[in-house]
Image (cartoon, rainbow, N blue to C red):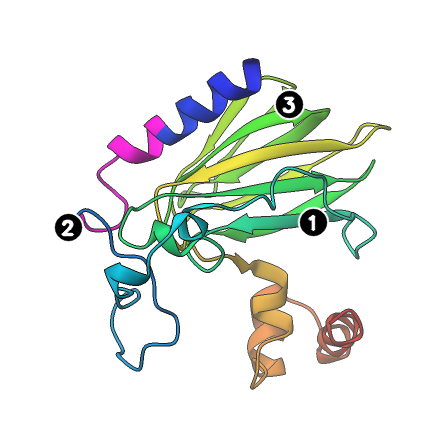
Amino acid sequence: MAVSIALCFLFAFVSVTNAGDPDMLQDLCVADPFAGVKMNGFACKDSTKVDETDFFFSGLAKPGATNTTFGSIVTTGNVEKIPGLNTLGVSMSRVDYAPGGLNPPHTHPRATEIAFVLEGQLDVGFITTGNVLISKTVSKGEIFVFPRGLVHFQKNNGDVPAAVIAAFNSQLPGTQSIGAALFAATPPVPDNVLSMAFQVGTKEVEEIKSRFVTKK
């Protein structure tokens, strides 16, 4: 019951915020990912071919495998998984964490995130543009908000698994992991840029880059 109430709250939050995707202009516009039309979003599927499967996704029902580099896994429920979300301005994800697992520093350039803790306990935080860290330990049944575009993270420092359900006020929030963006970009960010930015030598930069290449 508590989970159901929380999920209703999450959808209410993302539905009323003004900072998300543009308002829809028709009842529905199920995404057609195969359309040749290039636009800010997806073209609408032929309404005569729309059915209930366009609005359903079971992928968040079960924990994801956390045997990853960082001990966490994100399962997304965005417009790419649920075509019926097209133009609705909402989406959800599930994040599972092994004991000690980390969802590394990242941003969502197109959405604010509100996270509801399903299981366990997490140390979470975001960093303002003034380089101030806002952080807190959150437990099962609690909620934490990450403002749109700001760098944030979640860390499971407990000895049991943890999980959250996250809601976004965008059908496709986007995720940019800071480490991967800087050290695994294609083509690569020049070593001298990273060396100066992090005040380390090029040897250290190359070492970090090699670790990201290995983990792809």
Residue for point 26% across, 68% down? 43
Residue receiving disc 2: 26
Badge 1 element:
strand
CA neighbours of label 3 inside 10 A, class few (<14), some (14 to 19), many (20+): some
Indicate the amino acid at tag 1: Ile
Q: So how many labels did they put on this image?
A: 3
Comparing 63 with 180, the one in front is: 63
Residue 98: give x, y in percent of width and height.
Answer: 80, 39
Badge 3 element:
strand
Residue for point 28% across, 46% down? 88
Counting residues from the N terminus, which is met first, the one under dot 2 or under dot 3? 2
State the CA–CA distance, disc 3 to disc 1. Answer: 20 Å
Counting residues from the N terminus, which is met first, the one under dot 3 or under dot 1? 1
Residue for point 70% across, 40% down? 96
Indicate the amino acid at tag 3: Thr
Whether residue 110 is visible: no
Residue receiving disc 1: 73
Q: Quadrant of residue 141?
A: top right
State the CA–CA distance, disc 2 to disc 3. Answer: 42 Å
Comparing 194 with 78, the one in front is: 78
Query: Which image quadrant: the C terminus?
Result: bottom right
Residue receiving disc 3: 137
Residue 41: give x, y in percent of width and height.
Answer: 29, 64
Q: Which residues are magenta?
A: 12-25
Does 115 appear in magenta? no
Residue 152: give x, y in percent of width and height.
Answer: 54, 43
Give the vertical position of 47 relative to 64 (above or below): below
Badge 2 element:
loop
